[in-house]
Image: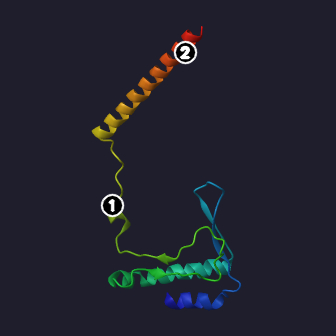
Amino acid sequence: MKTATNDIKKRNSSEDAYFGLFPISEGDDGYYISANRQGLELYATELLNASLESETIVLHPQKFEYNIGQKDWIDDKSDIYIDFVSPFLEKRKNIKKDEPYKETFKDKLITLILKILLIFLVICMIIGIVRVFQWIL
């Protein structure tokens, strides 16, 4: 695999390569890759090199990431810039997922108190407006 990545790097000139990550549209959560073949292949080699070094990185605490670094073939105006890869050995099924938030009694009580306060303020405002109109007329 290492020789394959080296061959790809030799075959693709960084002067000809282009790669960038940009939002699909303003306010949208989606992103797209704008790249030519050389840029895609060079970026893929960076990710393959990170995968090859992942076990070494995890087993050596002083080296905790694979640094991709700023490359001249990555667009400076790219909205997303991936500086490094931080690998870990866990399998996806072993990763704990965040549990959905469960509303507690305290949360429900605070919500109820705020609703009662809002209703009280609206009633006071209506009474005040009626009193002003009675005073004027």
In the rendered image, residue 17, in percent from the top left (x then y), is placed at 68, 81
**Mark 2 or 1, which is nearer the eye?**
2
* Residue 15 found in image quarter: bottom right
**Residue in view at x 33 percent, y 82 percent:** 61
Give the camera-side residue of 25 and 51: 25
| Precedes in sequence: disc 2 or disc 1 | 1
- Would residue 110 appear left or right of 40 to someone viewing this image? left
In the rendered image, residue 126, in percent from the top left (x then y), is placed at 50, 18
**Residue in view at x 36 percent, y 49 percent:** 100
Q: Residue furthest right?
A: 16
In the rendered image, residue 58, in percent from the top left (x then y), is placed at 36, 80
- Would residue 89 appear left or right of 32 to someone viewing this image? left
Which residue type does callout 1 highlight?
A: Lys
Secondary-structure class at tag 2 = helix
Q: Residue furthest top?
A: 137
**Residue in view at x 54 percent, y 82 percent:** 69
Secondary-structure class at tag 1 = loop
Q: Residues within 10 Å of mark 2 (few under 14, many from 20)?
A: few
* Residue 106 found in image quarter: top left
- Would residue 43 appear left or right of 13 to someone viewing this image? left
Q: Residue furthest left?
A: 105
In the rendered image, residue 65, in percent from the top left (x then y), is placed at 43, 80
Could you tell me which quadrant the C terminus lies in? top right
Give the camera-side residue of 67 and 13: 67
Give the camera-side residue of 38 and 134: 134
Query: Which residue has dot 2 on it?
Result: 132
Marker disc for residue 32 = none
Q: Is residue 31 above or below residue 109?
A: below
Instruction: Report, in whole angstroms, how far the alpha carbon at label 2 lies from the one at label 1.
Output: 60 Å
Query: Which residue has dot 1 on it?
Result: 96
Which residue type does callout 2 highlight?
A: Val
Q: Are marks 2 and 1 in contact (CB under 8 Å)?
A: no
